[in-house]
Image: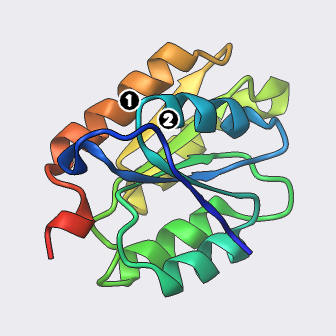
Amino acid sequence: MTVIEQGKNPEPEENYRIMLIDGPAGYMQQVKQECKNAGQEVVVVTTVEESRVFLATKDNVDVIVAEAFLEHDSIFELLKSIRQDPRHNDVPVLLMAAEPGAVGEQCLSSIRQVADILGAHRFIYMHKFDMPRLMSEIRSALAEMGLPKKLQQ
């Protein structure tokens, strides 16, 4: 069962729900703690299916941050289904490729193009994982969307 972890108690208009899709590198556990420290609600999933199940039952995910390289799943399949779902088609999806390795580096241009075509909000490449940069990208995406979805009802 997927758990929503509460961050510190910010004002309601500053409390967003962020879904993190963790890949084999495991960076999202670090991101989870940073987001919670910033007062956000965080949901960490490790498979596309787990994220689909969660999204089918909840309607107020504000941002999705996903590792571009998942071990057994295609993040592009999830991106397509999100863009086809009227409840979630406006949710910013940030795809992160951190330390992708030699093969991943060769594929970056193609992955970025597919991400753009399928409607990713941003594709973030990091030769070395950079937490401050990723948190800046998340804050920027949240600022662009306005109020959290749960307050837009």
Q: Which residue is mark 2?
A: 35
Q: Residue furthest front?
A: 9
Looking at the picture, tell me which residue is in the foreground, 13 or 51.
13
Label 2: state its secondary structure.
Answer: helix
Residue 49: x and y in percent read 71, 77
Q: Are marks 1 and 2 in contact (CB under 8 Å)?
A: no
Looking at the picture, does residue 61 appear above or below residue 70?
Answer: below
Of circles 1 and 2, which is in front? 2
- Label ID, residue 137: 1
Looking at the picture, does residue 7 appear above or below residue 27?
Answer: below
* Corner quadrant of residue 140: top left
Looking at the picture, tell me which residue is in the foreground, 84 or 8.
8
Q: Is residue 104 at least partly visible in the picture?
A: yes
- Label ID, residue 83: none
Looking at the picture, does residue 38 appear above or below residue 48?
Answer: above
Label 1: state its secondary structure.
Answer: helix
Q: CA distance from mark 1 to mark 2?
A: 12 Å
Task: Name the residue rendered at 51%, 50% in the picture.
Answer: 6
